[in-house]
Amino acid sequence: MSDYEAVIGLEIHVQLATATKMFCGCELSFGEPPNTRTCAVCLGLPGSLPVANARAVHLGLTIGLALGSQLAPRSIFHRKNYFYPDLPKGYQISQYDEPLCRGGRLGEVRIHRVHLEEDAAKLIHVGSSGRIHGSGASIVDFNRGGTPLAEIVTEPDLRSPEQASEWLKLLRTTLRQLGVSDVNMEEGSLRCDANISLREPGTSELGVKTELKNMNSFRFIERGIRAEIARQGSVLSEGGQVLQETLHFDPGSGAITSLRSKEEAHDYRYFPEPDLLPVAIDDGMIEAARSAMSELPAERAGRFVKIGLSAETAHQLAFRGELGDYFEEALAADVEPAAQPQALANWIVGELPGRLDDGEDPAGSRVQARALALLVGLVQAKRVSVGAGRQVLDTLVAEGGDPLAIVEAEGLAAMDSDDELAGVVAAALAANADAAERVREGNAKAIGPIVGHVMRETKGRADGTEVARLVNEQLGV
Amino acid sequence: MLELSARGAAAAIAAGSLSRGELFDAYRARAAADRAAAGDGLNCFTWVAERAPGEDSGAPLQGVPLAVKDLFCTAGVPSQSGSRILEGYEPPYTATVVSRLTGAGASLLGKTNQDEFAMGSSNENSAFGVVRNPWDRERVPGGSSGGSAAAVAAGLTPWALGTDTGGSIRQPAALCGIVGLKPTYGSVSRYGMIAFASSLDQAGPLTRDVGDAALLLRHMVGRDACDATSLEFPQQIELPTAERLDGMRLGVPEELTGEGIEPGVLQAFRHTLEQAQELGAEVQSAHLPHAPHALSAYYVIAPAEASSNLARFDGVRYGFRAEGASDLLDMYTRTRHDGFGAEVKRRIMLGTYALSSGYYDAYYGRAQRVRTKISEDFRTAFQSVDFIVTPTSPTVAFRLGERTGEPLSMYLSDYCTVPMSLAGIPAISIPCGLSEGLPVGFQIAGPAFSENRLLAAAHALEQAIGFDGGAARG
């Protein structure tokens, strides 16, 4: 399978953070008892009519602006017709050939379109299969039915499962920062389908694609795509042909099963929704979306570069908004000695996340932004060595508190006197005579055990660069 | 008391010379007798209110009873659009237009029979059975608002609410010798009307005279926040008083007044044109070059929308569900097979086909282009005439069963009414005489929101014609 290049596009459904549903006045549901957030409209009762939610249009425009899409001055709702018990009207109101937004880009991935639609209701199948076939009964909860969704469709610009997952995280951060959605995958407010095909590297033609449905965590997306790439790879390697079909990935078993083939694909019989007028966008609506929008990740990254961060660090901070917020708070703390922005950022994207739970917001941890700023300031002023600084951070993560107090209590202050350090170095050379000999003979890498010895002896208080300098000096290298 | 017009009755109640309770009881007795007789009577009513409404509300319609087509949702009252698939269905809410009218003082007298989901021109496609024409019980009342039209004509109600998609108010009004008005699309809320074809459906009054149509319409129109396609009516609907048609230019489109129109109907129509001229109107010929294609376009657009609108009737949540299904698809199939009548299934299949992948442009797309052309035809015509006038129906009421085996000949009943529906413009049918002892309807159509002028012209003509519908009221 390594012979093939994977071509991946994503379709992301985002539940919009409106107060009410897409086409009726029902409040959005957050775990209320089943069928308590419903009305004639979202139940599809005879005679009921939809009215488009202006707030959802506003949020859709906000997404379009953030992704640099073209906003259609006039877009149209269509009916997508198919029968299923979670679809009370027998059609979903969606958008078809005239979506709200077209084009755009986020990071390295081009956006194909963004459109608005309504969510389906939730089906619960009673019985062991968990699917409608073979279940004794199926129960419908219409609370979710009619929730506004933005569907974001990318161009097939992704090339690996890891890249897809990373990019999706970037999109999630962007959407969260825009405030358009809760973007909570576990609760289903962000759902992702992936279109996957393989081709010979260096060719530009697209292979036959399959669609992997409804993956609800970053891990599953990565695993699902990886499994499907492997499956397609072995089909092609054996001289077979990939069939165009819609697939389901079972994260429990890792199995990929077919939901329907191309022949079984629905003919959705799209036609313009006659119960709704076209959505006409005017300058006022665009201006409202623009002004309600907080700083976009790309703009923020640009600002970080201007205060001296590398492009890469700026990007990392800007696209994980919570890290960016924490960085700005630390920067504003005005500590003495002051931390340089790049050094501070390095600790925030490098040292801190590894010590927190995966994805945890540092603002919610015990490490106060001001404390981290002071710690980095102390390290930069060489009042605490890098190694000792890491120990201080461990303590901050575990217990919180003030770095100076921790340095004091744990005796982690950098060694002021070169004489004292020179003595420890001399002792280390004596204890590691073989290594010292190799260093003298020009093997610079052999210095490791010696430095390690010094660090152990000094509990990490020594500055690594200074130790190396003293070793070389004492060995006459 | 039963000979009073609806506005006459309202005025008498307001003046204290008539009791609203007595009036209601008198109509209730007639409606209930019709309901009880079912197929042995005219079969106009599918449900009749039990009790008279409370005493004097002071509202303008003064408790005058109102019959409402079955497809209007009425809370807690059976509303099944003439279909078995909504057997026993009682909606939890009331249609906006019905709420407006009861809010204005109308009393719900009962629900009226109709063609299933408003699909039909004879009221022979109903789960409640056929409706008979009070002028001749062996003949159809027209459709789809056949129950409403026959009930008004027979004096079982002072007036009634109907809906018109391609002629469903005007054609039965013509065949029953009463007044029927299809308002401008968007002027009356569709919220709570069980949909047939959303881009065409429009509620309107069926009344004994033009004045009553104006009064009922006055309390129907207006923007409804629940219907995105509804609009505020630009003026109040006035009660018409015009006696003359001086300076009015009536355009007679060759395309809708030639071949296919019965001689008797054409004769009554021409006689009415002469009366119009005597009132000062100028009669000239007009052109609607695309009108002959209207029926074809209509029978693509309306079934296409219907195929989608009727998808919700799947047996899952309400109404009829077939027994003994083995799985989900089987339940859908059996429920819809047994729950829908033949004409409804025919149109669902037509519409599904027209929207199918690969056929959309050839059918639905082309039909929409024809629709645009027809609208343009009317716009052009209204630059040189004030109104377009035609016979409402090419024929008088036909015999029960005469066309049930020939859908195409049935569809031709709407030949003269469908173009206005596609253009979304208002049109009224007034009785203009008899042919072979059966009523003939005269249709007047005007530009969008011209209802006040339309009603004024219809009123002047009505006075000159002096049609007497008393015979049907028995």
Image (cartoon, rainbow, N blue to C red):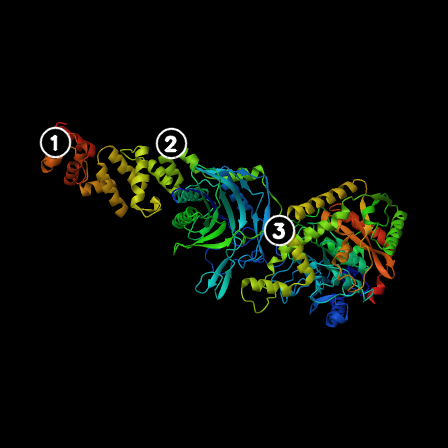
Which of these two is toward me, A238 or B291? A238
Percent position (x, y) of residue A58? 53, 43
Q: Pointer 2: what residue?
A: A305
* Residue at 69% across, 44% down: B369
Q: CA distance from mark 3 to mark 2?
A: 54 Å
Which amino acid type is shown beneath numbered disc 3?
A: Ser
Taking the image as shown, residue B453 lies to the left or right of residue B110, namely right
Q: Secondary structure at mark 2?
A: helix
Q: Secondary structure at mark 3?
A: loop
Circle 3 or circle 2, nearest the eye: 3
Circle 3 or circle 1, nearest the eye: 3
Q: Which mark is residue B356?
A: 3
The image quadrant that residue B158 belongs to is: bottom right
Quadrant for the N terminus of chain A, please.
top left
Quadrant for the C terminus of chain A, please.
top left
Taking the image as shown, residue A223 lies to the left or right of residue B274, namely left
Q: Which mark is residue A419?
A: 1
